[in-house]
Image: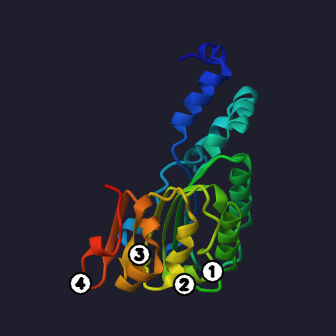
């Protein structure tokens, strides 16, 4: 399609095209020296072209003034974020934080789809604290949330956010304590859960039957020998 042809397209059509072109917006701060072994499923995206190519919302908005105005006015394309972070002792990356703030701001009140991958063992990373604090401020807009990372990240109060819009949750860690799962009962739209191990105690005693009635997809490992149907009531 020629430049003349695209210039004649209505803003609504361009916005739809932008939406299809903006699958994920990738923010990556990754240094292999920060980590040891990394699970193959948690390896970062290999960057084979300039970084802006992995930020379609930003790239489209940089094309011309018309496209910029459309991109800024269409929050959907800013709402799908993939964050890949290796944790080291380096100072916080202000450019990364500023870019994350920009995307969260321009996503307006749209539901957020977030894929958060944090790898490394430095448990006092101010940078990770800043990233998680920023995301938690917008937890009421999380629609889909996927987390991969080392266990220490759980201690940064990633748990217990406000989850009024959450529909899909995928977590790498095991749920062996009530604190890990109780807050999910306040997520009224939650339907799909994928996680590590769930203990019998958590399933039987710490979660209400009404909670399980909402779940349509459950992908977890369960510790202990027992009948799941005797502990939970699932929709027929």
| Residue in front for this viewpoint, 230 or 169 | 230
Image x and y of residue 230, in percent = 29, 74
Query: Height in image: 91 above or below 167?
Result: below
User: SS of the residue at dot 2?
Assistant: helix
Q: Is residue 4 left or right of residue 101?
A: left
**Image height of 29 relative to 153, above or below:** above
C-alpha distance separating marks 1 and 2: 7 Å
Which label is found at residue 156?
A: 1
Where does the image place residue 112, in percent across and percent down from the top left? 60, 52
**Along the line of sight, the residue nearer the viewer: 29 or 119:** 119
Which of marks 3 and 1 precedes in the sequence?
Answer: 3
Q: What residue is at 56 percent from the left and 63 percent from the top? A: 187
The residue tagged 4 is 225
Looking at the image, which residue is at 73% across and 26% down?
66
Q: Earlier in the sequence, mark 1 or mark 4?
A: 1
Q: CA distance from mark 1 to mark 3?
A: 21 Å
Q: Tag 4: Cα neighbours inside 10 Å, few (<14), some, or many (≥20)?
A: few
Pointer 2 residue? 152
* Residue, disc 3: 38
Give the mark nearest the N terminus, 2 or 3: 3
In the shown orientation, is residue 207 left or right of residue 64?
left
Q: Residues within 10 Å of mark 2 (few under 14, many from 20)?
A: few
Which of labels 3 and 4 is toward the front?
4
Asked whether residue 205 is in view, the answer is: yes
Residues under numbered marks 1 and 2 in contact, where contact means CB atoms less than 8 Å apart: yes
- Depth check, mark 2 against mark 3: the one in front is 2
CA gap, disc 3 and disc 4 = 31 Å
Label 3 vs 4, first from the N-terminus:
3
């Amino acid at each position: 399609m020629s430049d003349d042809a695209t210039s004649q397209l209505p803003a609504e059509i361009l916005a739809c095209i932008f939406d299809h072109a903006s699958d994920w917006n990738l923010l990556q701060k990754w240094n292999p020296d920060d980590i040891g072994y990394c699970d193959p499923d948690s390896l970062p995206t290999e960057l084979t072209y300039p970084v802006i190519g992995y930020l379609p919302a930003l790239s489209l908005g940089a094309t011309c003034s018309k496209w910029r105005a459309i991109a800024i006015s269409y929050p959907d394309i800013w709402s799908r974020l993939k964050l890949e972070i290796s944790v080291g002792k380096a100072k916080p990356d202000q450019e990364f934080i500023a870019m994350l703030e920009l995307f969260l701001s321009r996503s307006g009140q749209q539901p957020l789809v977030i894929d958060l991958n944090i790898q490394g063992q430095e448990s006092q990373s101010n940078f990770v604290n800043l990233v998680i604090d920023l995301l938690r401020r917008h937890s009421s807009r999380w629609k889909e949330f996927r987390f991969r990372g080392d266990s220490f990240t759980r201690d940064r109060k990633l748990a217990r956010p406000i989850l009024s819009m959450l529909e899909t949750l995928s977590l790498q860690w095991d749920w062996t304590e009530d604190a890990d799962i109780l807050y999910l009962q306040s997520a009224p739209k939650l339907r799909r859960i994928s996680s590590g191990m769930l203990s019998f105690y958590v399933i039987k005693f710490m979660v209400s039957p009404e909670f399980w009635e909402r779940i349509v997809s459950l992908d977890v490992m369960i510790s202990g020998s027992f009948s799941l149907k005797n502990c939970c009531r699932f929709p027929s």
